Image: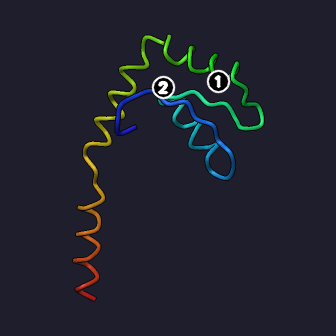
């Protein structure tokens, strides 16, 4: 997502299926579960993703979201609160 490029996702287990679904809903990915993965299905999913005229805009939006990483600010706030305890 940080690179701003379309993603072909192959979820294997656990929360990967949920993450793949979320990326698809955001318009930046297609997924093919490992149990159904074949070269033909992967090619079809990738072709569909790249043929969608909205994909570049969705990927650019996600890239912009990733640039402003809030984690350093969150850590600083938490650390400042811990010092007060």
Mark 1 vs mark 2: give the one in front: 1
Instruction: Using the image, determine if residue 39 lies above or below residue 62.
Output: above
**Image point (32%, 35%), residue name:** 63
Crowding at mark 2 (Cα within 10 Å: few <14, some 14-19, many 20+):
many
The x, y position of residue 7, in whole percent, is: 49, 30
Q: Residue furthest right?
A: 35
Instruction: Using the image, determine if residue 40 lies above or below residue 2.
Output: above
Local secondary structure at mark 2: loop
Lower sequence index among marks 1 and 2:
2
Instruction: Using the image, determine if residue 16 lies above or below residue 40.
Output: below
Say left or right for 78 vs 10: left
In the picture of the structure, the residue carrying the numbered disc 1 is: 42
Q: How is the image coloured?
A: rainbow
In the picture of the structure, the residue carrying the numbered disc 2 is: 27
The x, y position of residue 32, in whole percent, is: 67, 30
Q: Indicate the quadrant where residue 9 lies.
A: top right
């Amino acid at each position: 997502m940080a690179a701003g490029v379309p993603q072909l996702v192959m979820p294997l287990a656990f929360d990967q299926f949920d993450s793949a679904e979320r990326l698809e809903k955001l318009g930046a990915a297609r997924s093919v579960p490992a149990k159904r993965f074949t070269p033909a299905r992967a090619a079809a999913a990738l072709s569909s993703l790249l043929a969608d005229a909205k994909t570049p805009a969705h990927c650019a939006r996600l890239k912009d979201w990733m640039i402003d990483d809030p984690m350093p600010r969150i850590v600083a706030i938490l650390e400042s609160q811990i010092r007060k305890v």
